[in-house]
Amino acid sequence: MELESHARAGPCRAGGLSVGQVNKVSHVFTLSHVAEMLGEDEDWLFEVAEEMDTEDGQLWVLGVGEDGVMAFTDDGIDNLKGLIEIHKEDPSIIEDRRKTLAAALKPATEKTNDD
């Protein structure tokens, strides 16, 4: 019975440190590697993967003097495969996003005082 009460007491302590949730990601694959694995164009795959969040298994790996490299967990690659199917079924998704972004970044036209 005493063992049960300790099991419910809270997080385990090892060497005086609390052990919380353990990250189960032991490796990631860079965008260029995933593009090669899947036989897809890297630039196109980047645009597809921009829709993903960290929770989807897409993350950025940073190094000294680098802007960062997009990378994926194993689950991220599975999620990316689903997005690839969606984008192949409807290629207009990326083009529509490009147009929306271009419109948002375009400076508003100035009004003239001829009114």
Image (cartoon, grey):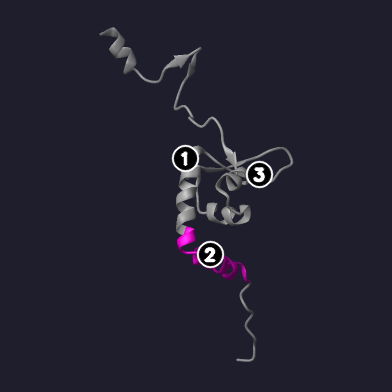
Q: CA distance from mark 2 to mark 3?
A: 23 Å
Q: Which residue is mark 1?
A: 75
Position above or below: 101 against 59: below
Q: Which residues are magenta?
A: 87-106
Left or right of residue 65, residue 71 in this image: left
Give the amino acid at mark 3.
Gly
Q: Is residue 56 magenta?
A: no
Q: Is residue 89 magenta?
A: yes
Tell me which corner region of the image, top left, top right, bottom left or bottom right, holds residue 113. bottom right
Residue type marked 1? Asp
Nearest to viewer (mark 1 / mark 3): 1
Furthest-left residue in view?
A: 1
Mark before the other along the chain sequence, 1 or 3: 3
Per the image, the residue denoted by label 3 is: 68
| Picture residue at 45% right of the left edge, 62% below the top | 89
Residue 20 percent across, percent down from the top left? 45, 25
Q: Residue lying furthest right in this view? A: 65
Q: Circle 2 sits on which residue? A: 97
> Badge 1: few (under 14), some or many (20 or more) residues near its Cα, within 10 Å?
some
Q: Is residue 27 above or below residue 86?
A: above
Q: Earlier in the sequence, mark 2 or mark 3?
A: 3
Name, please, the residue furthest toward the top: 2
- From the top left corner, tell me how far across and down residue 48 is, in percent: 53, 55
Q: Earlier in the sequence, mark 2 or mark 1?
A: 1
Circle count? 3
73, 111: nearer the viewer: 73
Residue at 62% in and 83% down? 111
Circle 2/circle 3 CB separation < 8 Å? no
Helix, strand, or loop for circle 3?
loop
Q: What secondary structure is marked by label 1?
A: helix
